Image: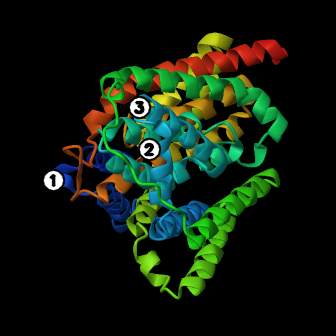
Amino acid sequence: MIPVEIAHIVLPLIVAISIALMLTRPRGIPEVWWISGGALLLVVLRLVPLKLAGKAVAEGSDVYLFLIGMMLLSELAREQGVFDWVASVAVRGAKGSCSRLFLLVYGVGTLVTIFMSNDATAVVLTPAILTAVRKAKVSPLPYLFVCALIANAASFVLPISNPANLVVFHTGMPPLGTWLADFGIPSLLSIVVTYIVMRFLFREDLAKQIECEVDDVTLSANGKLVLTGLAMMIGVLLTASAFKRDLGLPTCLAALVITAIVSIKTKSNPLKLAREISWGTLLLVAGLFIMVDAVESQGALKLTQQWLTWASNLGQTAGTMVVGFAVGIANNIVNNLPLGLIAGGTIEAAHTKGLIANAVLIGVDLGPNLSVTGSLATILWLLALRKDSGAETGGEKLDVSFWKFLKVGMVAMPAALFAALGGALLMHMMTGQH
């Protein structure tokens, strides 16, 4: 058993090294091995009791179910030609213009994020857009970056737009009307500013024309069935959110029902789809949950509570900006899912409400646009690209390094976050809240 004094040094050191290795991926080793390996080391060294580790893993059950459901639907949609159909519609709708294709992709990404969550944009939409840019034979990066950035930029329009929203507010989730009043303008500014920044950064690629012709693809009956299932899932998620229920189980059950119906109709083996699910991602999430609980067990929550109280005393404008940007940047150090857990616990412990609590949520949701490891949605997006790592599109391999993402994120994230926090301040003053 490691002495307590040494444990207080070794535990955060293991967590910090694991996260650093996740960010840099030495020798191309996937993120999951660094995080799950670090979590396992904490348990083996008895820095985290086995009971606490089990409790931490169990806390993520809703997230695991949600991701399984979304990944299963993604594979089903791919198998039934839904992605090919979406790609055909998008490229033909662009009418030869790269900028128009960019706008179409951005619009679709916004709607998917709002009504199906940012993880769905990463898991379901990214493969469809990848298919589209391959058909159009254009540089893929502008359109693929849309899937990553809009997944976070539009993730606080509704409570269901990001699972982190439910984690942050937990039992204190505002009614839908209050939510829209607080986050309607900030989320709109976030979406618009992110679009403007990306449109500028990729202006050279978007000034080009789409030279190739794309054949019209007809959606099969089974493909229509999958789309209908997706529409039903949106209804299920909105209903579950309205009743403040967890989203994971309804999402997973809906995906299983849709998969069963299509598999029976096509007489295909559903286990083939199950094998395509990125099970390693679930290990990554479980490892992050263990690390968060480990850090919290050493009194981290008291420190964050003291910091939040200090920031709240800076004044309305300064406090909002400091909290929003500090939380936003912190996402990229520990990932927004565990940070959301810490932020939710801190808000509850400090009895924080109103503008400062809203700034915390905006930082948790929008901050991950800075780096590729800032949110689970962005990691899922990156994994979706790496799934096609053997292929090339427009001469570029389908992998985005930490630094390549940072070059875009360091411009897009601060601009959108400043605009969103400014919008939150404006709404606060207009409604006369205190």
Q: Is residue 73 left or right of residue 398?
A: right
> Where does label 1 land, which residue?
27
**In-image side of 258 versus 56 (left or right):** right
Which of the numbered marks, if any, corresponds to residue 97? 3
In terms of secondary structure, where does tag 1 sit? helix
Q: Nearer the viewer, residue 9 or 62?
A: 62
Q: Residue at x 27, y 34 (%)?
A: 404
Callout 2: SS: helix
The tag earlier along the polypeptide, 3 or 2, is 2
Disc 2 designates what residue?
91
Could you tell me the amino acid type at mark 1? Arg
Query: Mark 1 and mark 3 in contact (Cβ < 8 Å)?
Result: no
Depicted 12 relative to depicted 34: above or below: above
Residue 257 visible to an observer of this rendering = yes
Disc 2 residue type? Val
Residue 321 pos. (x, y %):
57, 17
Residue 284 is marked as: none
Residue type pointed to by label 3: Ser
Q: Which of the two labelled residues, at mark 2 and mark 1, occupies the earlier sequence position?
A: 1
